[in-house]
Image: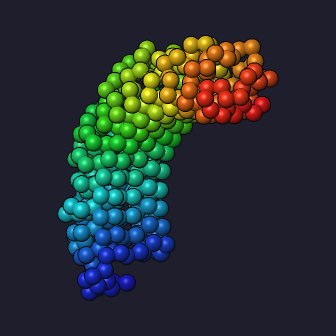
Amino acid sequence: MDNKTFSQLSSLEYLDLSNNNLSVVPKGLPRNLVLLHLEKNAISSIPGDALTSVRNLEYLLLHNNKLRSRSIHPMAFQGLKKLHTLHLYNNLLERVPRGLPRRAKTLMLLHNFISEINRNDLSLLYTLTELNLSYNKLTNLKIHRDAFRKLRILETLDLSGNSLHAVPMGLPHSLQVLEIKNNQLSLIPDGVLTGMQKLQKLILSDNKLKLNSVYQGAWMELSALTTLDLSGNQLTHIPSDLPESLEYLYLQSNRIYSITASAFEGTPNIKGIFLRFNRLSVDSVDESSFAHLVNLQVLDFGTGNTELSLKGNDKKGGGSMDQET
């Protein structure tokens, strides 16, 4: 394959070169390409002029290669003003590459070796709506508190599978989905969720959170939240001050040993409560906790609790309840 292999295909919009043995992004690509598949090769570098001809490119898929940050030329993506989706996951990136396309909306950087995010690494990516940095090597000390300041329309952020001990400060207030599962979280710092009035889904499962890990009133600030996943933590009670908007609450695999009558007073819209693998017993659950929950469809105590079987469990709360023991 040489620089002229595809150059005369002036009408070509879709080119799939995945699952080959390419070591570099080929030059001389047809100028009207919209979607370019280069994943699952052995690409280890992107020269500065490799993509200059494909000005109409919208999707560039480079995952599962051997790219390092320093092997991506800072000018490699310059001129790709229509590029909105860039996949760079499962590479060897040790930091956020420089010169990323400024109009990108979706940036997938998961499963790399990124250990830091400096103040200006993301500062030119104004149009990002989805950013995935999961399963890298990030720690709180290596994420600058202003790193996300320019991402003012970001809707989805995934930081799962890193080594964070606290929810990072300075997250965008535009977020609708935030995932920080499978870290070392033991702290939700004071004010870190303030202003997140668009957040609908918060996934904090498989961490080390306790009741005192969360500042007073944190959950109440999330006035649009419908899904809260705190499974796989170290909670001993149902969290207090849950937002009225909440519909699904995942608390399985914690250390919860009692449920008080007032546990769900502030969540009249809740549809699903999941409590498998806790330390509940028949004497530690107040039946009246659920009596007013007219929208409740699933109450799952499942397995892993102690001899738990509530009385009068038919149609309590206005819906069916899974209380398999």
Instruction: Examine the image and state in which quarter residue 87 appears.
Output: bottom left
Left or right for 69, reference 160: left
Image coordinates for residue 78, horizontal then vertical, percent: 21, 61
Q: Nearer the viewer, residue 40 or 211?
A: 211
Image coordinates for residue 21, horizontal then vertical, percent: 47, 74
Q: Nearer the viewer, residue 241 or 63?
A: 241
**Residue 300 in view of the camera:** no
Q: Residue at x 37, y 47 (%)?
A: 131
Left or right for 251, reference 75: right
Residue 22 vs 312, above or below: the answer is below
Q: Nearer the viewer, residue 110 or 22?
A: 110
Residue 163 vs 187, above or below: the answer is below
Residue 266 vs 1, above or below: the answer is above
Image coordinates for residue 105, horizontal then vertical, percent: 30, 52
Q: Quadrant of the N terminus?
A: bottom left
Residue lying farthest to the right in this orientation: 307
Image coordinates for residue 263, horizontal then vertical, percent: 57, 16
Q: Residue at x 44, y 55 (%)?
A: 89
Q: Residue at x 49, y 45 (%)?
A: 135
Left or right for 56, reference 287: left
